[in-house]
Amino acid sequence: MIRPAVPADLPTLQELERAAGVPFAALGMHAVAEDDPPALELLGEYVRAGRAWVWDADGPAGYLVLDLVDGAAHVDQVSVDPALRGSRIGRRLLDHAAAWALSRGLTALTLTTFVEVPWNGPYYRRLGFRFLAPEEETPGLRALRAAEAAHGLDHWPRACMRAELADWRALTG
């Protein structure tokens, strides 16, 4: 079940982030696999803002946090315990984020992702996201991409993606 994240969840969210990073090592993306999870203070900001949710299966098994970027709900992070991959937890969390965004009059979900990692770019395409051409990126998305590049993430192809929530509603019923 999906519920709002609470402060007591934050260390577990960091553990989920570490676990979700491990599969990247198999692709030779060791820097991603070994990257530190978001700081407790940052995760706490999402909780206080009401933009953090967990999939609770006797404790958090996945989580999603949202930012607001240039009028869209921006998926800053969605991570699921790799042992539960394929159980549609990520999809359910994204559906919840889309419903939250729609209820606030937002029209799109955005995110940045690795283009070629199977559980990143190709996965989000199957869910209805589309890759944005560089000229379609909003100023906020360009700033996020610049920060990612400065962090070394552009060693592997990355891009911004967007899903229109009107389309998302049609896809999910």
Image (cartoon, grey):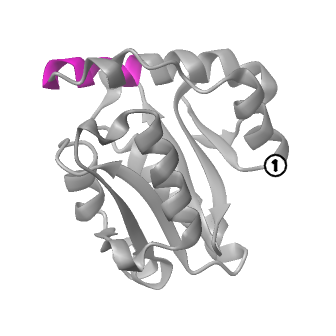
Locate residue 135 relative to residue 15 in the image: left or right: left
Q: Main secondary structure of the magenta part?
A: helix
Residue drawn 49% across the image and 78% down it: 165
Of residues 66 and 166, the one drawn nearer to the viewer in this rendering: 66
Q: Position of residue 62 (x, y in %)?
A: 50, 32
Callout 1, which amino acid?
Ala
Q: Is residue 131 above or below residue 60?
A: below
User: Is residue 59 at least partly visible in the picture?
Assistant: no
| Residue 172 visible to an observer of this rendering | yes
- Between 123 and 40, the one lying in front of the other is 40
Identify the residue at image location x=35%, y=45%.
88
Q: Nearer the viewer, residue 4 or 45?
A: 45
Q: Quadrant of the C terminus?
A: bottom left
Q: Circle 1: is it few (<14), some (14-19), or many (20+) Cα within 10 Å?
A: few
From the viewer's side, name the closer residue of 108 and 139.
139
Quadrant location of the N terminus in the rendered image: top right
Marks counted in the figure total 1
Q: Look at the picture and state if 105 lies above or below 36.
A: below
Image position, residue 69 (x, y; %): 63, 65
Quarter of the view holding residue 152: top left
| Magenta residue check for 13 | no
Residue span colored magenta: 19-27
